[in-house]
């Protein structure tokens, strides 16, 4: 280094830690930073405020202040300028239970309760995977028996009279319970070394994913009776359930495939060298690891399957949406269908939002755990 | 210790086992695979044959022939909206064509609207401005978490509840919103809008090379190129020229109330409007999340490096963030576009004559269920595959090269 | 901004710099002066604030109290001053931060062409020279993903040098490299030091510090605990914490 004296130096000072200096007027600073930090920002704030001002007060006036909350008399609603929320207490039974016989609707409630409770248990992850799977299957059997009736002194209710929330939930749970194993099998088949199986799986997955769900439901509804021999009929509910399950399986297969690819080859090789058979390798080594990787994406597909249950209304099953539309054909209350649709939108929103928040929570926990 | 191994003559198996046996075949990994596959194929073919046999039997019992010959037959039904000429005496084939064009029309419009909404909302959710961020978040969460069909029916209900043409909501008397749809001024000459579209595309095609040439000259010499910018401006003016030629004074008719309806101008049907809103607002929320995660995926280190070599925010976004984010965003966005095309089939719920809706009618009127559905399936699959192919080509083209 | 700088004016000055993350006091009364052409090495345990200090110098982080002056320009909230400082200060990151979608040549020429208006030919010439200087002239048209870690970091050093900076900041430049590639990067940094560049390096490479530094600074828990010339620092550390740290690092 050079011979001239070194200019660089540092002053060693030992200072105690102090709290951060209070800024002048934090509210003013907060306002400035968030809303007015640049001319562009200010412009955005102005636009946003303008948009809010022209929409929000009118909406609040319609939805809250001028609204009629409860009255069995439709005339009062006609006279009011605001929303007629009274339509909901009037019609909620049809909206939520469809054409299920009035006296038996407690069975629908019980079915809803069973499913929601089991969903909560699954979310809290109290049970092991195997116990959970068994509980869901057992719960669905119970729910089916409860809804169908005909045994244990319950009046029989055929599937074409099922409707509303129980129907939506049963269709949803059935789709997921049937679709995930089918999806796993398809994904494994797609990675298979055997060309025929691989081709069949790829063909199925790509064709089903390239078609709209409505058309798959439609085909199931229309074409399955065509392909069955004389005298054998499959219940429309089962046809729809089959279509929804196969559709979900194709998408789930792609999600699982991503997970299988993400697992390094080393895991497969280690399992082979320890002498595991294919089934043991998959069930004990590969799939458990895959499950953790794909859980967020699978939750996305599950939430989408829940929203897709609305499509069964198009082929004539009375899920919540179609039940509501039908209920709103009542000439006395027909003009208030918007309120009814807002109500079920809220219902769907609460459930989907809860599921998506849960999924985000899982994702965060998985990332921390690494 | 001596280890002895009895040398085996080649081809000799451990004694005691017959040369050919089922258990040997089962345990041979190659043969087992073939056995599985043969089994699977035979079952699938057998099942297929059984099902097809049933179908043929029930079809012949109903007196319906099979085959695609029915396509040339007269359709016998009207279609409410059409981009090409069509009447009830036209063939089923032509009906399919009309339906396909209707599907494409609503799909393209929705893709454009959804992309605009998605980019605005996605960037908005990243904004430092709290108001903009909250509004974007509310939009995204509300429209992502409600089913698309519910949204669609909601919009349709609102539009059909609008006042009739006599009390239509008007924007300055040249555009009207009523329960008959949205009526806007439009060219009388049918070719004019296509010419305008062509001129816009031509302008873009000429503008980009001109600008690129200008930038290149600037990089080479370090000085701005006013001549190039003037040329670019001239190209941009081309559409405006067309607009002037077919301008407001002669060729655009403004919708005016005549009797119960609007005459003149272009009326966008309530079905189309509802379907477009239902598709765009829903998918727009998903595209917003794609944009947001795409931009967030760029590590802060990239931005810091760009800052430390002296780039201004505009250039940081243009040269460093945007190109990388685009690579991440395009594949899932393409998936959403395919979703829009497929979900246009929900038009059946509001009566818009898109492919699924029309196929429904064709199945009912012609009785050729299997053939009609097969045609519909092929069209949807064709569109999905086409978009996937374009996506693959794009992906291949912009691969970030690694070892 | 001062029009003429006296020859003895220091390149970088930090005076009573304090920084908080929320309520956490992360830099406490940091005082450091770096003379022109001199090399300062900052070491310390993780979380000691050493990276934060140098990131405050080119405003990648903001300090709440105190003054930072680079080449006579104060680092504050004024955008123009920040821009001026960033043109005089080159930064090399631990994770290289090369732009993966651009070739090595484009990585180098992007900054000067866009922010300094340097014509393309001149920028490319300068880039080729710097690539020769860091000993990888043949990699100009490869993409960062195709290079080894050591090569990428040398490209990053060349990229920082493209702006012809007065001061070079190094934030743990070799910490993310495999051992066999560390020395090729340190060789480049040593050559840079011998050519007279003003450097502030945060690093754990003590041999490099011994060879190259004019001043070695030890930071712990946000404050400067000890600062001395390398011989004094390594042979006779005065503070107990310095001794403890050195015993852990040098074996």
Image (spheres, coloured by chain):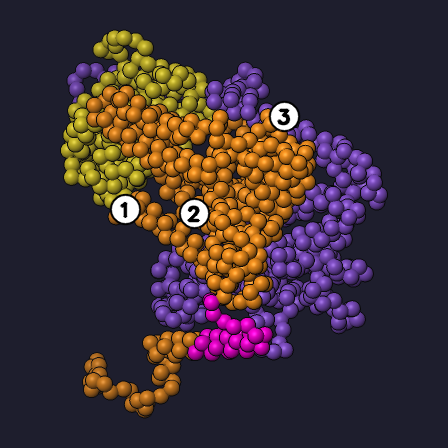
Q: Is residue B166 visible?
A: yes
Residue at 78 percent of width and 69 percent of height? A154
Disc 3 secondary structure class = helix
Residue neighbourhood size for the residue with mark 3, other residues' Cα within 10 Å, grouped as few (<14), some (14–19), many (≥20): few
Residue B45, disc: none
The chain displayed yellow equals: C
The picture places residue C216, in percent across and down from the top left corner, at: 28, 26
Q: Name the residue rendered at 36%, 19% in the picture.
A: C82
Per the model, the C-alpha gap separating discs 1 and 2 is 24 Å
Name the image quarter holding residue B132: top right
N-terminal of the pair, mark 1 or mark 2, is: 2
Residues flagged by tags 1 and 2 on a common chain: yes
Nearest the viewer among B315 and C193 is: B315
Q: Are marks 2 and 3 in contact (CB under 8 Å)?
A: no
What is the C-alpha distance between the residues marked 3 and 1? 52 Å
Task: Pinpoint residue C40: horizontal percent, then vertical percent.
Answer: 27, 24
Q: Are marks 3 and 1 on the same chain?
A: no
- The kind of secondary structure element at disc 1 is loop
Residue bounds of the magenta highlight: B42-69
- Mark 1 Cα-neighbour bin, 10 Å: few <14, some 14–19, many ≥20: few
Q: Which residue is mark 3?
A: A53
User: How far apart are labels 2 and 3 at the CA level?
Assistant: 36 Å
The answer to whether C235 appears left or right of A367 in the picture is left
Chain at tag 2: B
User: What numbered label is drawn on residue B402?
Assistant: 1
User: Disc 3 is attached to a residue of which chain?
Assistant: A
Q: Quadrant of the N terminus of chain B?
A: bottom left
Residue designated by label 2 = B334
Tell which tag, 1 or 2, sits nearer the viewer. Answer: 2
Chain B: what color?
orange
């Amino acid at each position: 280094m050079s011979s001239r004296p070194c200019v660089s130096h540092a002053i060693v000072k030992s200072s105690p830690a102090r709290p951060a200096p209070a800024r002048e007027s934090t509210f003013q600073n907060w306002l400035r930073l968030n809303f007015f930090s640049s001319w562009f920002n200010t412009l955005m704030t102005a636009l946003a405020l303008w948009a809010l001002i022209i929409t929000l007060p009118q909406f609040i006036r319609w939805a809250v202040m001028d609204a009629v909350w409860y009255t069995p008399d439709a005339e009062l609603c006609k006279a009011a300028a605001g929303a007629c929320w009274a339509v909901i207490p009037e019609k909620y039974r049809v909206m939520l239970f469809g054409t299920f016989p009035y006296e038996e609707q407690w069975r629908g409630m019980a079915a809803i309760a069973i499913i929601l409770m089991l969903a909560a248990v699954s979310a809290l992850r109290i049970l092991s995977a195997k116990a959970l799977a068994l509980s869901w299957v057992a719960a669905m059997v119970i729910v089916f028996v409860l809804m169908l009736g005909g045994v244990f002194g319950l009046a029989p209710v055929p599937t074409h009279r099922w409707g509303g929330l129980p129907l939506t939930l049963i269709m949803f749970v059935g789709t997921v319970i049937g679709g995930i194993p089918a999806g796993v099998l398809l994904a494994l088949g797609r990675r298979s070394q055997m060309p025929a199986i691989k081709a069949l799986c790829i063909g199925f997955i790509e064709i089903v994913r390239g078609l709209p769900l409505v058309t798959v439901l439609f085909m199931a509804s229309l074409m399955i009776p065509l392909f069955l021999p004389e005298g054998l009929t499959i219940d429309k509910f089962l046809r729809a359930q089959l279509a929804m399950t196969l559709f979900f399986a194709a998408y789930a297969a792609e999600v699982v495939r991503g997970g299988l690819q993400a697992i390094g080859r080393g895991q497969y090789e280690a399992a082979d060298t320890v002498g595991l058979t294919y089934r043991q390798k998959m069930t004990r080594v590969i799939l458990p690891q895959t499950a953790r990787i794909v859980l967020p994406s699978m939750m996305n597909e599950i939430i989408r399957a829940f929203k897709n249950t609305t499509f069964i209304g198009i082929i004539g099953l009375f899920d919540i949406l179609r039940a509501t539309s039908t209920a709103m054909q009542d000439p006395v209350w027909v003009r208030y269908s918007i309120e009814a649709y807002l109500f079920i939108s809220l219902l769907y929103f609460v459930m989907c939002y809860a599921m998506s928040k849960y999924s985000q929570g899982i994702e965060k926990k998985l990332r921390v755990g690494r | 210790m001596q280890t002895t191994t009895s040398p085996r003559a080649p081809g000799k198996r451990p004694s005691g086992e017959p040369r050919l046996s089922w258990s040997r075949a089962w345990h041979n990994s190659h043969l087992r695979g073939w056995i599985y596959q043969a089994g699977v194929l035979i079952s699938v073919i057998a099942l297929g044959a059984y099902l097809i046999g049933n179908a043929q039997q029930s079809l012949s019992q109903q007196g319906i022939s099979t085959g695609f010959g029915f396509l040339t037959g007269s359709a016998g039904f009207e279609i409410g909206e059409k981009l090409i000429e069509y009447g009830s005496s036209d063939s089923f084939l032509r009906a399919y064509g009309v339906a396909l064009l209707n599907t494409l029309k609503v799909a393209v419009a929705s893709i454009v609207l959804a992309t605009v909404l998605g980019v605005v909302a996605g960037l908005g959710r990243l904004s430092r401005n709290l108001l903009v961020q909250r509004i974007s978040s509310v939009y995204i969460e509300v429209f992502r978490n409600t089913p698309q069909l519910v949204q669609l029916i909601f919009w349709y209900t609102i539009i059909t509840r609008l006042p009739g043409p006599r009390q239509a909501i008007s924007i300055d008397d040249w555009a009207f919103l009523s329960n008959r749809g949205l009526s806007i001024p439009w060219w009388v000459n049918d070719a004019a809008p296509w010419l305008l579209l062509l001129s816009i595309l031509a302008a873009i095609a000429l503008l980009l090379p001109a600008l690129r040439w200008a930038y290149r000259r600037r990089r080479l010499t370090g000085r701005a190129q006013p001549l190039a910018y003037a040329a670019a401006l001239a190209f941009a003016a081309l559409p405006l020229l067309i607009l002037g030629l077919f301008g407001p004074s002669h060729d655009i008719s403004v919708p005016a109330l005549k009797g119960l309806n609007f005459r003149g101008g272009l009326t966008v049907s309530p079905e189309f409007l509802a379907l477009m809103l239902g598709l765009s607002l829903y998918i727009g929320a998903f595209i917003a999340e794609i944009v947001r995660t795409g931009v967030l995926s760029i590590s802060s280190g990239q931005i810091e490096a760009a800052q430390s070599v002296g780039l201004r925010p505009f250039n940081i976004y243009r040269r460093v963030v945007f190109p990388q984010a685009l690579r991440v965003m395009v594949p899932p966005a393409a998936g959403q576009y395919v979703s829009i095309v497929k979900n246009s089939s929900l038009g059946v719920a509001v009566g818009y004559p898109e492919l699924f809706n029309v196929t429904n009618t064709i199945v009912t009127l012609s009785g050729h269920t299997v053939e009609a559905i097969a045609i519909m399936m092929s069209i949807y699959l064709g569109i999905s595959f086409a978009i996937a192919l374009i996506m693959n080509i794009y992906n291949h083209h912009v691969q970030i090269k690694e070892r | 901004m001062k029009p003429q700088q006296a020859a003895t004016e220091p390149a970088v000055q930090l005076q009573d710099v304090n920084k908080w993350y929320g309520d956490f006091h992360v830099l406490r009364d940091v005082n450091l002066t770096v003379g022109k052409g001199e090399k300062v090495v900052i070491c310390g345990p993780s979380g000691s604030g050493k990276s934060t200090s140098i990131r405050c110098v080119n405003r990648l982080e903001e300090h709440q109290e105190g003054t930072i002056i680079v080449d006579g320009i104060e680092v504050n909230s004024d955008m123009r001053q920040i821009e001026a400082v960033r043109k005089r200060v080159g930064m090399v990151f631990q994770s290289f931060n090369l732009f993966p979608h651009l070739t090595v040549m484009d990585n180098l020429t992007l900054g000067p062409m866009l922010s300094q208006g340097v014509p393309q030919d001149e920028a490319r010439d300068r880039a080729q020279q710097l690539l020769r200087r860091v000993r990888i002239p043949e990699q100009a048209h490869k993409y960062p993903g195709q290079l080894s870690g050591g090569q990428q970091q040398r490209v990053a050093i060349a990229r920082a040098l493209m702006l012809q900076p007065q001061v070079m900041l190094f934030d743990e430049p070799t910490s993310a490299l495999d051992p066999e590639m560390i020395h090729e990067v340190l060789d480049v940094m040593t050559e840079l030091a011998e050519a007279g560049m003003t450097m502030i390096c945060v690093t754990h490479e003590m041999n490099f510090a011994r060879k190259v530094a004019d001043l070695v600074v030890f930071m712990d828990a946000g404050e400067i605990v000890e600062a001395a010339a390398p011989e004094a620092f390594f042979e006779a550390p005065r503070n107990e914490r310095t001794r403890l740290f050195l015993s852990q690092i040098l074996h």
